[in-house]
Image (cartoon, helix red, strand yellow):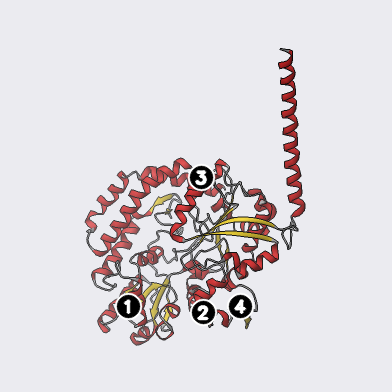
Amino acid sequence: MKTRKVLSVLMAILLVLLAACSKDSASKGESEEKENLNETGFPIVEEQITLKVWAAMGRTTVKNWNDHLVWNTYEDMTNINVEWEQVESEAVEEKRNLSLVSGNLPDVYYAANMPTTDIFKYGQQGSFIKLNDLVDKYAPNLKKLMDEYPEIRKAVTFPDGNIYSLPVIYDPDFTSVRTHPLMWYNSELLDKYGMDIPATTEEYYNFLKTVKEKDPDITPYGSDLGTRMLSYLRGSFNVGTTGRDYIDKDPETGELRFYPITDNFRELLEYANKLHTEKLIEPNIYTIELAQFLNNGGEDKYASMVYYAPEVLFGEESGTKYVGGLPLKGPHGDQKWARVTPPVGHIGKFIITSENKHPEATMRWIDHFYGDEGARLAYMGVEGDTFEIVDGKYKYTDKITNSSGGLTKEQEISKHTIWIGNNPPGILMEDYFDGSESSDQALEAAKKVEPFMIEEVWPPFTYTEEETKKLAALASDIEKYVLEMQDKFVIGDEPFSNWDKFVKNIETMGLDEYMEIQEAAYERFLNN
């Protein structure tokens, strides 16, 4: 018995000593990490570290990031080596889920578009670390944006008050990228008819009628998607005035509402039905292929359309004939531009996992891309190599625009920068973006709608696990039904005499519970 007691005491002492050693070892490791870290400036670390990063690739993203201009440059700046595991677009979902379930986690998920349900689930489990304190201490660029635009912090904060992932941010001042697609008019036709750019829904209707009567070979209105017209008209009928699909605030009560069942939305559909019935809209607008639409535009077959910059997408000869339009004043005097993208894009762009031994350095590493210099590196590359400054503007060099290897401009951009095809974590800024929204034509058109932009723009809300399960089932039925029926109302397959039946059907699908979940999420969003 005495021997057993002695052994028990010795074992207890041994366990205490092992725990102490383990604690000392961990403390020593943390101390060494912090000694190696530079809290400001470059390099980020004195002794090189390596991060294993899982990265989702777009279809047009090059697959050579382990030897790439931007990443090689950034490694030299930071002293952080990245071992990239690049995942093809068609395999992203499968491989992302496999890594999560297996527990074989990388140090970082990059551009992974991680679903918010997974972010919250694995964040609460501890597989994804909390980023709140790391952002405050080691991400001055991102913190500055969050302080200046509180809606950014609100958008990435989960129901438990924690931030587990970082987003792509669209510079709030880059209104062109946040307001497109816009309405465009063929200026030659406006001049021919002696008409100004329509400013009301009635003036727009008269313009379309004039085109049909005087130039029957030209389609009065066209687009690549039938729903673009409805999105364009939301602010004219005072619905969707928070930038979101399906939910907004009642202008009279300020309460959350499901606007597809409102009288205003019915009026919007009736207006669109009128245009469709009188054949003022592309007859196959719900089935047209993008290539056919672009070809039609290049052949001057549209008098008006909702799309992106025509001079970029239709070619200079045809595209430069178009001028940007205005939000239309509706039948009740409403004139708002309601289709505005929030400054926060997908929030699941950058995640630090529990496997990461260098979270502070990793946060400093990604924070660079939320500032001006990092955005320039990500989107333009290296000065003197891939871009130069001409008359105060950042322009790609001939290396990009006149490929020696016969590549397209987009292929050369992808070869030397990191943004093509994957919308990376960081901030997208007007000065460094080469998309159609940054063309002179697009910027000029965006300025026209700026005075009419809605002030309150909601990002997607975050939900608890229980809310997500309920909402997924409810939304699948309710939102799908709305989309199907709105199209039927527009093209005339469903008479408006059935409107009350349409509303009743939605209500019986569980609309009350759907809205209760949205209201709870909205309240949390306000309080984040």
First in sequence: mark 3 or mark 4? 3
Q: Earlier in the sequence, mark 2 or mark 4?
A: 4
> Of marks 4 and 1, which one's residue comes earlier in the chain?
1
* Screen quadrant of the N terminus: top right
Mark in the foreground, 1 or 3: 3
Please say if the residues under marks 2 and 3 sit with CB atoms less than 8 Å apart: no
The residue carrying mark 2 is 440
In the rendering, which numbered label is found on residue 102?
3
Q: Which residue is mark 4?
A: 387
Residue 419 horizontal side relative to residue 277, left or right: right
SS at mark 2 in the image? helix
Check whether the beta carbons of the residues at disc 4 and disc 1 lie within 8 A of each other.
Answer: no
Q: 452 or 365, which is in the foreground?
A: 365
Badge 2 crowding class, 10 Å Cα cut-off, few under 14, some 14 to 19, many 20 or more, is few
**CA distance for labels 1 and 3:** 60 Å
Type of the residue with mark 3:
Ser
Look at discs 2 and 4 and give the one toward the viewer. 4
Quadrant assignment, res 24:
top right
Callout 1 environment at 10 Å: few (<14), some (14 to 19), or many (20+)?
Answer: many
Who is closer to the viewer here, 472 or 457?
Answer: 472
* Residue 303 image position (x, y, % from top left): 34, 79
Amino acid carrying label 2: it is: Asp
